């Protein structure tokens, strides 16, 4: 949960496998919050600030085996520390809501469940990197992301310029991700909520809005 000093700002993250529609739903929620008069910031991980975006380029481009899993975990946490200090914390202190496409649960899923780093090790690293800072709400989109990721894998032409390194990690890896996010949600019921990604964009957005409105008592 967010620190007590962030009395009005809220930190909401979206999680899920590749191709499940997180970025689209982040955009829809941002628009709905604006319509309700709630000032907010849209951001993403890895990335979200100048320094963090430089680290992002190292992680999301190139060959799938370019980094040792622990190196990847360290890079993600380095990016996260930059992102929090430069973007998230200032926005929350100003009373803004922060809507983020991915956060620490992705590191647990990808580098932990997917690549074999012990979850306890990743949680300890998160504690050191962020002061054990977690969202007020994590929305996990659950759907047929695997097939969409594989479809995009078939369209790859240039590993050095496209941000599709994780999408190219294969069907077995993506299958692990589907289950890992659900397991994370089950273990963190006070923070995480699973939302079906089935149906149209607007149908999913309505489910997300009902969840957010209920959680934070929005009219």
Image: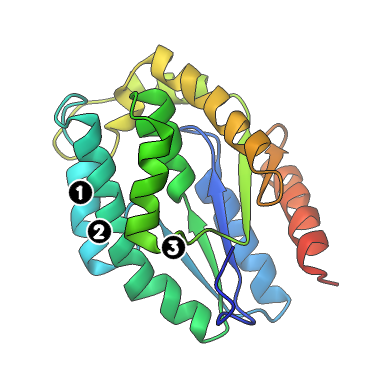
Q: In the rendering, at what x and y percent does residue 200 appear?
A: 70, 39
Near mark 1 (Cα within 10 A), the count class, few <14, some 14-19 or many ≥20, is some
Counting residues from the N terminus, which is met first, the one under dot 1 or under dot 3?
3
In this view, the residue farthest toward the right is 219
- Between 163 and 138, the residue placed more toward the observer is 138
Look at mark 2 in the image and give the residue it sits on: 53
- Between 88 and 118, the residue placed more toward the observer is 118
Relative placement, left or right, of 45 versus 37 is left
In this view, the residue farthest toward the bottom is 94
Q: Secondary structure at mark 1?
A: helix
Look at mark 1 in the image and give the residue it sits on: 57
Counting residues from the N terminus, which is met first, the one under dot 3 or under dot 2?
3
The mark tally for this picture is 3
Relative placement, left or right, of 198 versus 153 is right
Quarter assignment of residue 198 = top right
Near mark 2 (Cα within 10 A), the count class, few <14, some 14-19 or many ≥20, is some
Q: Quadrant of the N terminus?
A: bottom right
Query: Residues at badges 2 and 1 in contact (C-beta under 8 Å)?
Result: yes
Q: Distance between the Cα atoms at labels 3 and 2?
A: 11 Å
Relative placement, left or right, of 34 versus 67 is right
Q: Distance between the Cα atoms at labels 2 and 1?
A: 6 Å
Q: In the rendering, at what x and y percent does residue 216 appear?
A: 76, 67
Can residue 60 be spotted in the picture? no
Q: Secondary structure at mark 2?
A: helix
Quarter assignment of residue 181 = top right
Look at mark 3 in the image and give the residue it sits on: 43
Query: Residues at badges 3 and 2 in contact (C-beta under 8 Å)?
Result: no
Q: Is residue 62 above or below residue 169?
A: below
């Amino acid at each position: 949960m967010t620190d007590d000093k962030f009395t009005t700002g809220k930190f909401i993250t979206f999680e899920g496998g590749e191709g499940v529609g997180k970025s689209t739903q982040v955009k829809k929620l941002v628009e709905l919050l604006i319509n309700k008069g709630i000032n907010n910031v849209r951001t993403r991980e890895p990335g979200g600030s100048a320094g963090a975006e430089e680290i992002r380029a190292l992680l999301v481009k190139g060959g799938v085996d370019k980094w040792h899993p622990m190196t990847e975990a360290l890079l993600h946490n380095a990016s996260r520390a930059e992102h929090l200090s430069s973007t998230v914390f200032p926005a929350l202190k100003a009373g803004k809501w922060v809507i983020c496409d991915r956060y620490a649960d992705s590191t647990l899923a990808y580098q932990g469940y997917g690549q074999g780093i012990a979850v306890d090790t990743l949680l300890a690293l998160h504690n050191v990197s962020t002061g054990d800072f977690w969202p007020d709400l994590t929305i996990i989109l659950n759907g047929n992301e695997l097939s969409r990721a594989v479809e995009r894998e078939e369209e790859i032409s240039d590993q050095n310029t496209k941000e599709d390194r994780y999408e190219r990690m294969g069907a077995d890896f993506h299958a692990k991700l589907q289950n890992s996010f659900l397991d994370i949600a089950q273990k963190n019921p006070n923070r995480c909520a699973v939302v079906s990604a089935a149906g149209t964009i607007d149908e999913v957005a309505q489910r997300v809005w009902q969840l957010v409105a209920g959680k934070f008592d929005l009219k």
